Amino acid sequence: MMPLVLSLALIAAGALSLHVLPLHPIVAYTAAFMSSSIFFLVAAYHIFRKDLPDSYVYTVIGIALIVRLSFMWTAPVGSDDLWRYYWDGKVQAAGINPYAHAPNSAELKHLSTVTIPSLVNHPEMKTIYFPLSEWIFYTAYMMSGESAWGIKLLLLLSEALAIWGLLLLTKRLDIPRRFVLFYAVCPMLLFEYAIDAHVDGFGLPLLVFSLLFYVDKRKLLSMLLLGLSLSIKPTALVLLPVLFFAETDWRSRLRVAAVPLLTLAVLFIPYVLSANPFESLSTFTKNWTFNGFVFNVLNSYFENNQQTRLICSILLAAAVLALSLSKRQLFDKLYYAVLFLLLFSPVVHPWYVGWLAALLPVARRWSGLVYVSTLSLTCFTYIGYQLRGVWSEEPMMWLAEYLPVVVLAGMELWRAQELKPAAHLGIE
């Protein structure tokens, strides 16, 4: 028990050191993120090996939430996306469609303050965020104005809900509750959501409760929640083929496909009437690249951005289809569908991997545990950008991040390991 206690304490200490390290903020952030990630892997090893009482698990979860709370009034360090959130919220609070104008447009000049939109990145681009996100931004702005605590408080509540949902889901699947600690004490989630306040954190409880209701055969409610998660970020689109082929009749398959997409479409309707919500999304999906594994490998050969993106899309579709039609159990399929998406995507910021982290308590795969840890190496790109004004990926750091993940995932898939506790639920 002592090695686990020590590693958990060091995770917390590593994160909390960000409050006191006498270094440039991004250097302190990198040191704290990387050290906490190392201790997380040690803790994960002992979580696999030790049977923990529920009271111990609840205590650790409580401490993890308190550590998150300590960053409520801390400014973001690794990313400035928060200021775009508040700008969108302010624009919507003024009764203006946030998809209609870029932050630097003359039409919105009357909303400008010292803080925003001067701190918004890419002010020449209209917002890229999905409709439910926009309503969350509006709520946070109405709560706190341009202060960071509004978004951070809502994210803390979202993470608490995600943890609660995972406790319920692991109980329903007869999985020991100690594995919820894979989510609760994961440093990546703390740094990307509690500190940098990324919007993905709002989608995770929707995903978790969607899966819980799916297991409980409340599939209409499950698909509604999945549609709401798509309205935060469309990551869960890769789960739809898995759930589609998991159904045994065409009526159920139609519901699985239609309800989430209709939910997403309905939420877009108020915005589509006066603007094109997909303008910046189109630019992003055509041109942006960062930290993609398969994309970087292929593009080093083809040297053609659009051609490489097309090949990655085809490979991803084939991989997800093969996975969906395989004999693996449901949560194995869901986990690897998200992992495949991340491996084939041209853009993988660390906070994107939160969607995979939400599945770790039920999937319990070392590939994901290592991934949420090694992606702390992307901080070296942020150091270069913030200290020298140069945005570049270090090839050695990129390889060190991905090679262990790919090797572990390949071994897992080759061995075709099964999660026996879920078998009696009829959701293989």
Image (spheres, rainbow, N blue to C red):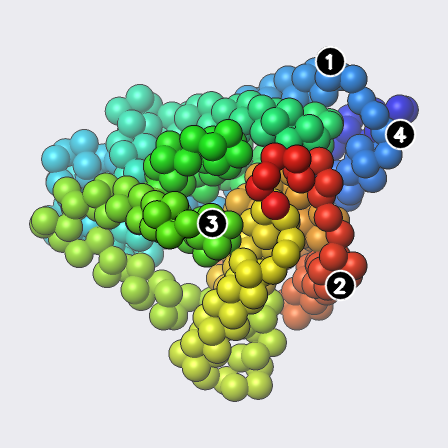
**Residue name at image x 33 percent, y 56 percent:** 122
Kind of element beneath mark 4: helix
Q: Residue at x 10, y 49 (%)?
A: 273
- Mark 3 or mark 1: name the one nearer the start of the chain: 1
Query: Residue under circle 1?
Result: 55
Expressed as whole percent of the image width and height from the top left, the position of residue 151 reads 40, 30
Mark 4 and mark 2: span between their CA atoms? Answer: 31 Å
Asked if residue 374 can be seen in this view, the reply is yes
Placement of 378 over or under 176, stated as above or below: below
Q: Of discs 3 and 1, which sits in the foreground?
A: 3
Sequence-wise, the earlier of marks 2 and 3 is 3
For the residues marked 1 and 4, what is the alpha-carbon distance in whole angstroms? Answer: 18 Å
Residue 414 circle label: 2
Instruction: Using the image as rendered, state which of residue 62 and residue 265 is in the foreground.
Output: 265
Residue at the image position 19 percent from the left and 39 percent from the top: 91
Q: Is residue 91 left or right of residue 367?
A: left
Query: How many C-alpha atoms fall within 10 Å of the one at disc 1: few (<14), some, or many (≥20)?
Result: few
Label 2 sits on what residue type?
Trp
Residue 229, image x, y percentages: 40, 41
In the rendered view, tell whether residue 93 sits above or below residue 38: above
Q: Which residue is mark 4?
A: 3
Q: Earlier in the sequence, mark 1 or mark 2?
A: 1
- Write down the residue under mark 3: 248
